Amino acid sequence: MKIGNIARPDRKRPEPLWHQAESALRSLIADGTWPDGTQLPNEGKLSEMLGVSRITIRHALSNLEESGLLRREHGRGTFVRSSTVIAGVRGLTSFTQEMSDRGLVVGSMILEMIELPADTEVASALEIPEGSPVVKLRRLRAGNNQPIGIQTAYLPSGRVEGLLEIAEPILSLYDILRDRFAIEPKLAREIYRVGTVSEQDAALLDVETGSPAFIVRRITSDSKGPFEFAVSTMRGDRYEIRSKLHI
C-alpha cells in the first residue's frame, strides 16, 4: 500500500483530530496517491499510520464516505470511489465548484458554442420573447479524467456580448459571467428526473445508449432575472442525490 507523504495530525493545532485525519486522507485521494478503486488499510492500520484513535479514524472515514469519496463494502473493506458528484442540500454553486469541493480534478470540453434563436422552452425559462438570440454552450464535464455529464446552457445574448469570442477554456461559466459580465447568481431552481443517455451522448459519456441518467433542468437568476437555462445529462453511476430527513 503506497502511503506517500502523509501529514499526521498534530494535537497542538486548534483543529479537531478527526478533521486533521480527514484532511490527511482526503489529500491522498486528491493527489492520486490512492486512485479510484484503491482499498484503504483497515482502521487499526490507519490509526497506527496517523497516530490517532480508531474512533477518530472512524469519524474521518464516515465524513469521507458522506462526501462521496469512499465506499464501504460489508465484509470487504473501504475503497476509494470512482469519480462521483454528490448533489444534495447545498448553496448556489457551479458544477466546477461542486467537483472541486469533493476533491475531484475538474475537466471540461466545449462541444458546441453558437448563437441561435430561442425556442419556446428556452424563451419561457429565460423570460424572453420566443426567437430572441441566445448563446448555446454545450460542454462535456469530467472529474478526475472520467466523464460525468453533458451540460447545455442557454444565455440571453444581450447579457453576454462577447462570450462567443472568448478563446480560453471555460471551466467555470459562473466565474466568467461574474468577472466579465458582472452577473452574480442569486437564485436557482432545479428539477431532477430519471432518464436515459441518448445515442448522441453515449459515446461522449463512455456508456451504452439507454444507460440510466439524471436529467437536470436548472434556471439561474440574478438581480435582473433569469440569465441561464441549463439542461444536463448526468451519468447515473457517477452522480448521486443525497438528503437528510429530520422529524
Image (cartoon, rainbow, N blue to C red):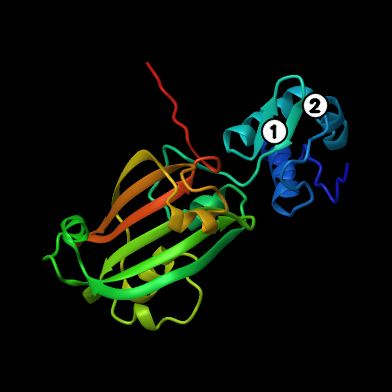
Farthest-out residue, top: 247
Amino acid, disc 1: Trp
Q: Quadrant of residue 145?
A: bottom right
x and y percent of residue 193 in the render?
A: 35, 39
Q: Residue at x 40, y 65 (%)?
A: 138
Judge from the rendering whether residue 75 lies leftward or rightward of residue 122; answer left or right: right
Quarter of the figure with residue 80? top right
Please name whichever residue, 132 or 212, is drawn nearer the observer in this view of the structure: 212
Question: Which type of secondary structure does the marked residue at label 2 adopt?
Answer: helix
Quarter occupied by the C terminus: top left
Query: Label 2 neighbourhood size at 10 Å, few (<14), some (14-19), many (20+)?
Result: some
The type of residue carrying mark 2 is Glu
Asked if residue 219 shows in the view, the reply is: yes
Query: In the rendering, which numbered label is found on residue 189?
Result: none
How many angstroms separate mark 1 from mark 2 (CA)? 13 Å
Q: In this figure, which residue is indicated by the disc labeled 1?
A: 18
Badge 1: few (under 14), some or many (20 or more) residues near its Cα, within 10 Å?
Answer: many
The residue sitting at 44% across, 30% down in the picture is: 243
Judged by depth in the image, the label closer to the viewer, 1 or 2, is 2
Task: Name the residue carrying label 2.
Answer: 43
Q: Nearer the viewer, residue 237 or 13?
A: 237
- Point out the tag, 1 or 2, that comes first from the N-terminus: 1
**Foreground of the two, 107 or 10:** 107
